[in-house]
Amino acid sequence: MSSTPTEPEPRAAPARGPLEPDPRELRGALRLLHSAVFLASFDRLAIAPLLIPIALDLDVPVEQVAVVATLYFVGYGITQVLWGFASDRLGRVRTVRIALGMSVVAGVVGVLAPTVVVLAVARFVAGAAYAAVFPTAIIYIGDSLPAHRRHGPLADLMAVSAVGMATATLVAAGIADLSGWRAAFAAPTVVAAVLVVLLRRVPEPRVDVPRQRPAASLAAVLLRPWPVAVLLLVLVEGMVLVGILTYLPALLQRSGMSATGSGLVTAGYGVAVLLAAPLVKRLARAGMSAGLRLITGGVLATASYAALLLDQAWVGVLSACVLLAGAWAFMHTTLQTWITEVAPGARATAVSLFASGLFLGGAAWTALGAAPFASGRFTTYLVAGAALSAALGVAATWLHRSYRADPARSGTGT
């Protein structure tokens, strides 16, 4: 007796809310946004191995080129909140496309820059433009998915950003060795132009959420003690964990290493971030307290400066890269979670100001290091960085403990 095979019943599509996009549509959108986030992270660290090549080509002191890096971070920091307001008014995808278009113009000017002044202006604009990409991608995910489905896509964004940082110093240095520093700036400019076109196919998220006025959001953050405390902590964190990165390839090149070699060593930072982030996530799930994560980050940051004080050749620089990555994974992720708790009614503004503080701190520390690096007095700068890192770890841990004990704090936290 034969039986006729029956077709299996089609699996029902997972239910989604009325405002959620089609899953295939969302996957395509996220792939393009991932590409933009990768590009923004790449561009942010691309100048690190180029300080000395630019100084030699334009015949200027290296501290003047360090100002170029500083202005990039300033542009990146001061425009975070403005881009948040723009995305509310213009739309998420449109904001990213406008920002990438600005980066293309800035990139062309930077590639053709005849003087370090023109290059500095171009990089300032590039930093201001790329500042829109990562936070807007986070907001896009928040608009498109319910809270319980955001963790995976947000973790993917962090991973893509880490890969961008890991490849930036190596690829930029390799291109510079082969074709000059201008080509190293031209590569991301071309990619940005392509993304401006491709992002046309990405739909805006369908949202139906009332938006707070900018003045009210800013007041909710800046007129309350705990948000201000976290913003001050991240300003110092940006100094000790972000500002020093600009000088690591230049330390190696000054001792005779090629740009490519210095880029290969300092690429260890991005690789270590990629490995450390999931470790910290597992430790947090296993019960490691926020206070312990903060003090661990402070210890690792202090150790990174100690490694550079002991050795500024490749062993010391690679050790510093790994330790800085560990400090970032332990401390920054904890502060990032904390800022989402302290002003629940103005969370987007708080996160934007948080990012501003991080990169303005990085800009300040890069600027403060220019003269010591050029004059050979870098040891004093490193000692100050070690002391500041230790103080940050202690202050962050004490403040977080005080926050948990404060019955009037905003949010509940974990």
Image (spheres, rainbow, N blue to C red):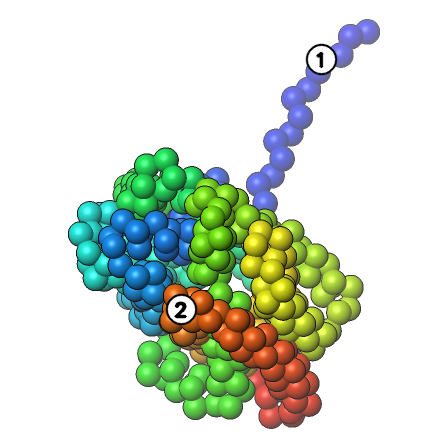
Q: Is residue 386 visible?
A: yes
Q: CA distance from mark 1 to mark 2?
A: 86 Å
Which residue is under mark 1? 4
The one of 389 and 191 positioned closer to us in this rendering: 389
At x 51%, y 75%, the residue is 380
Q: Quadrant of the N terminus?
A: top right
Of all residues shown, which one is farthest toward the right? 1
Q: Quadrant of the C terminus?
A: bottom right
Mark 1 Cα shell of 10 Å, populated few (<14), some (14-19), many (≥20): few
Name the image quarter holding residue 131: bottom left
With 320 as the anchor, is 242 left or right in this view?
Answer: left
| Disc number for residue 375 | 2
| Residue type for callout 1 | Thr
Up-down relation of residue 414 to residue 31 (above or below): below
At x 40%, y 69%, the residue is 375
At x 59%, y 45%, the residue is 14
The one of 213 and 13 positioned closer to us in this rendering: 213
Q: Secondary structure at mark 1?
A: loop
At x 60%, y 39%, the residue is 12
Name the image quarter holding residue 176: top left
Up-down relation of residue 22 to residue 70 (above or below): above
Q: Is residue 159 visible?
A: no
The one of 6 and 263 positioned closer to us in this rendering: 263
With 347 as the anchor, is 130 left or right in this view?
Answer: left
